[in-house]
Image (tube, coloured by chain):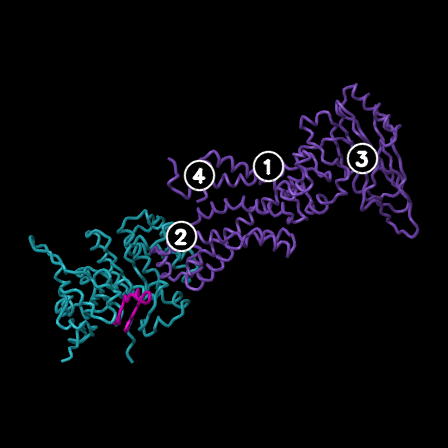
Chain colours: A cyan, B purple
Amino acid sequence: MPNPPLLEVRDLTLSYGSGSKKLTALDRVSFTIKQAGEALAVVGESGSGKSSLASAIMKILPNNVSEFSGSVRLNGEDIKEMPESQLSRSIRWKRVSWVPQEASAVFNPIYQIGRQLEETLGVHGVRDSQVRRAEAIRLFQLVGLNSESDLAKYPSELSGGMRQRAAIAMALALKPSLVILDEPTSALDVSLQGGIISLLQDLRDQFDLSYIFITHDVVLATKLCNSFVVLYGGRIAEYGSREAVIDRASHKYTRALLNCVPTFEPGQKMLSIPGEPPDLRKVAGRCPFYPRPAIRCDGCRENEPPVLVEVEEGHWVAQHILSS
Amino acid sequence: MVKGIMRTIFSSFLGKVGFFLLLAFGIAAVVVTVVFPPDFGQRIWNNPVYWADYPKTAIPSWWPEAGGKAQHQVLIATTPTNMTEEGAGKTLEYRFAVGISSQSDPKFLSFSISHLQFQDVSPVIAVLIEQDGQFLPLYSYVVPDRFSGEKSPISRYATEPFRVQLTSDYQAEGMVKELLSGLRNRGQDRFTAVVRLNFASREDSVEEVRFIAGGESFGWLGTDDLGRDVATGILAGLPIELLIGFVVAFSATALGAVIGTASAYFGGWVDLITQRVIDVLTMVPTLPIVMFLVFAFGANLAYIILFLIVFGWTGLAIQIRPWIMQIQAEGFITMAKARGLSDKRIIVRHLLPQTLPFLFVTFTFSIPGAILSEAGLSFLGLGDPSVPTWGQMLQQGFRTGAIYLGYWWWILAPGLAIVLTSLAPALIAQSLEPYTEPRLRRG
């Protein structure tokens, strides 16, 4: 029997609130990361459900979640069915860790960074304080920070780029197999982005890490990821390998998104997608593309929810089955 | 944080005043706790026998109005000045240096002896006054012998001291007067009184001997209608007031912070139930219900403290809940959960520390509240009778009509004491405001 995939997400649906306020952030989202070392990009505009995906995989959800269905299997085990204590003890940070969008928000502002790193090690069973200290130093060296002075600093004393590196060090503390990167470079200068991306590439190669790279920057994602999920209105618009989604994009929305990538050509008109993403409170059971004429296709006219169709092996595209 | 708090306190004048006032009270409370017997309330304060030698409602002796009146003196000895052993017996000598007022003579002289124990032969008591190396006998007495069937050691005056008025007859009074005027003319300000006890056995003993020079003014703060020294009562009450203030304020603050935080953190039904409980506790009028509870369970200090805590934490819990909700929305709490930290750790290490300065100020502000609540209960007659509290002193004064009769020291002293002990933490809390409200910061 083949090994179960590292991460298998099936029909993941996540809604907040109820009644007329019910907001479906994720609607039957499915994808797979087959083995260690693979990186999956989740691209989409703001409000497409990207960040909800991260918290759903960690199962850290706000109190107002009204629906959470489907399955999230890590090496075959469904984390949705696990009790909270087991999640805290053996899943969170041990197998899946997280670098959130705002690196400044990773750390509690009132404690030194080194202390928080050591806290993470401590609550997961590293009792010896000297071992914790040595491990913190090793992690800081790994991400290119000065382990002597920076460990003793408070979060506010580090620059944005350094904080992001510290956040990555924190994410690697317990040697997880999967790291969720939630827009890890969006708050950084372009000159610093490259450094972070190449650090992430090195770490992936060195430790066989898998990433879920949540971003709105398609170009950056192609540097790191070998498969792509394009999210729109909480649904998958297109899903497949990098080559399939980037080179042979077949959904109208994916192509529009790729067209927006700027080039150096002077005088070139910057493109955008007219309209705005759909109101997630209104698209449940409807076609998310219908409210936005720029990406509406013939099939959207009936405002029926689209289905994912496998157009070539491993390349799925949201389409409408037209009843003839 | 401690440094920041201290700096803020010392940066304002009122903060300094509050701090040193509280420090002085704290030191005084420690001294009182060490010096006063643990059963002071029951054995001494609320025991009229103990105060029988003291004048009733005597004015403080430093008060100008008391100028013409003799100071009442109660000299207490528990160990003899001299002990001589002869044969099988012994003689104990208690010497008392009695002050002489320049204007008036003592109203009377008396002495008392409590709890004598002897084997077979009755001890002999003699009271003398020393003059120019001579002893003038004033009084002598042979303690009643063994009653039939009484077993050794024989005990006398255990429940009520043996008390003798030395100047009750003309002869004695005249002799004392003569003696005192002689001494006064020679410029002496005191005379020596001696109580001598002759015991037939060395195992015989006596607990306490007192010599009293009667007067109408007494001590720093006068006495109440039972002859109790108000100053002693104020001192004895200090550690109890501080205990009530600190224990109630600390417990209520801790309880309010933890419950409010848990309510916000866990949300759902935990939040719902907590909020309803708080609603009920806040809506119930605290004083009447605490009065009822004290009435039902008995006026015991521990219960009173418990009730004040139970009804004291809700305000903070209401205040802190939305604040915790706000902190929780910050990324680092989500990250703390993602890092696999337990709920307890997140609450104690990551949520509560953010509110610590505020909690400290709340704690300081609740100390006077607790002291005043207990005083209020005591004033209504619901204080614990086994411990002296200022509220009870006020209540007794009020009940006996001290205000109308002009015994101001009896009302003013405990009243001022309550005000000052409440004021000290309130001043500190006031000076700490800039610590939690950055807009008030100067420089």
What secondary structure predominates along the stretch shown in magenta? strand
Q: Which residue is under mark 4?
A: B8
Q: CA distance from mark 3 to mark 1?
A: 39 Å
Secondary structure at badge 3 equals strand
- Which of the pair B295/A110 is nearer the observer? B295
- Which of the pair B276/A87 is nearer the observer? B276
Q: Residue furthest front?
A: B404
Q: Nearer the viewer, mark 4 or mark 1?
A: 1
Q: Residue furthest left?
A: A267
Image coordinates for residue A84, horizontal then vertical, percent: 40, 67
**x 91%, y 45%: residue:** B145
Q: Residue furthest right?
A: B148
Q: Nearer the viewer, mark 4 or mark 2?
A: 2
- Tell which circle, 1 or 2, labels the residue nearer the N-terminal end: 2
Residue A109, labelled with which disc?
none
Letter of the chain that mark 1 sits on in the rendering: B
Q: Which residue is under mark 2?
A: B323
Q: Nearer the viewer, mark 4 or mark 3?
A: 4
Residue B416, labelled with which disc?
1
Q: CA distance from mark 3 to mark 2?
A: 68 Å
**Residue B305 seen in the current view:** yes
- Tell which circle, 3 or 2, labels the residue nearer the N-terminal end: 3
